[in-house]
Amino acid sequence: MNYLDEGVAGMPERSPAHVLKIALVDLPTRSSEQRAHVTELAVALSRHSHEPTVFRHKSDPAAPERVIAREGYEVVFVPTGTPQPRDDDAERHLGEIAEFLAGRWRSSPPDVVHSHGKLAGLAAVTSVDRTRTPVVHSGHGDDSPEPLRSGDAARLLAREVARFVTTSAAEVPELTRTGVHRARISIVPGGVDLDLFHPDGAVARKRHARRIVTVANAESSRGVAELVSVLPLLDDTEVVVVGAGAEARELRSFARHAGVAQRVVLAGRVPRSARPALLRSADVVVCLPETAPFGRIALEAMACGTPVVATEVGVLADAVVRGVSGLHVPAGNPRALTRTLTRLLDEVSAREQLGIAARDRATARYSRDRLARELTSVYARVADVPVAVSPQAVS
């Protein structure tokens, strides 16, 4: 988006590009995907020559107040009253959090604040009262406990936030029910690093002829159990589960009872640098969450040219184009899941065609540079400043 001023002779002149100072507020959350999404956004904005600062929960009392990330953006750690992420105690310290943020912004306010999650949103709209800095807010399907889930909190955000940004169309109806007009909502999906996640490169070794990769978190635990339950019907196939965490013990027990313990690998946390090789080794990546505000593992798989089978929810409903870049299955239908996986695992050409289209889809719609460009446009609109365009703005 270009912003023009009228010259003295009536001819338009281009305004000087403005380097945006953006505060990304990412307070206590159980969602590692939200944290990764905000990090990806900060990296992308830095690549586009803007100046993002990430405000995060201070989980270690001995940690410094601020650090500079390798990519050049600043991370400021906010004391939230508790070392445990997403503890109810953090809500009782909302005033302290808001005052901490306000203190940082009084002398040098950002051009725009982008809050992630309801606690961050409430802290942000309270903190900018004096500077009148515009707030952009992303709820990300926030699952905050009471009282943050109350109608008063939602109405406050609906009234004070300049613009709402969602990662998929699935969140729009919920926002409009809280009183947010559709014209104040932008849909900007997350981004993936296409330089790291791509089809060419190292491939992790398999233990069986065919491999399915999936991810276990709070939103997908039932889906992972469903996948393990159909594994006895899939010959010479292993399932690699990324994540698991608290669900690991239950998954191990479930796999033993299903008689497939030797074909279920609980990989735990897989470092970002190791995920491309794992995703390339998969014949298919299966994502069966109940909600999907980010769909990070699916986007990374698509970027690696690996087909995705997913429930039609959240970001997955938009990213996975049925029969083109992947396949959708209904939630809670093991029979349909078995049919879909059997057919896909048996048809190499079908997997290859879906994988090629998946890479094309990721490249066209989900690059992190496109994420930066689209959000920069939103920020510039609410802050009423021209956009700085860097050479890296073109993917």
Image (cartoon, rainbow, N blue to C red):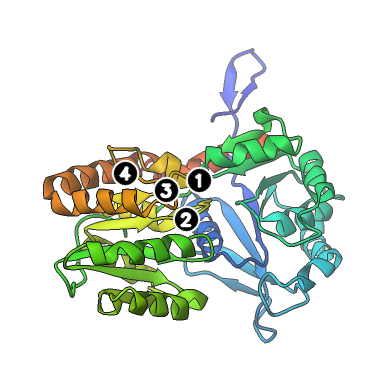
Nearer the observer, 340 or 246? 340
Label 1 vs 4, first from the N-terminus? 1
* Kind of residue at disc 3: Thr
For mark 4, what is the residue?
327
Q: Residue at x 59, y 56 (%)?
A: 52
For mark 1, what is the residue?
314
Question: Which percent across, then down, holds residue 343?
Answer: 19, 49
Separation of marks 1 and 4 at Cα, in angstroms: 15 Å
Label 2 vs 1, first from the N-terminus? 2
Label 4 vs 2, first from the N-terminus? 2
Label 2 vs 3, first from the N-terminus? 2
Give the left or right position of residue 189, taking residue 347 as reference. right
Q: Image quadrant for the C terminus?
A: top left
* Kind of residue at disc 1: Gly
For mark 3, what is the residue?
311
For mark 2, what is the residue?
289
- At mark 2, the secondary structure is loop
Nearer the observer, 326 or 108? 326
Q: Residue furthest top?
A: 10
Q: Are marks 2 and 3 in contact (CB under 8 Å)?
A: yes
Circle 1 crowding by C-alpha within 10 Å: few under 14, some 14–19, many from 20: many
* Kind of residue at disc 2: Pro
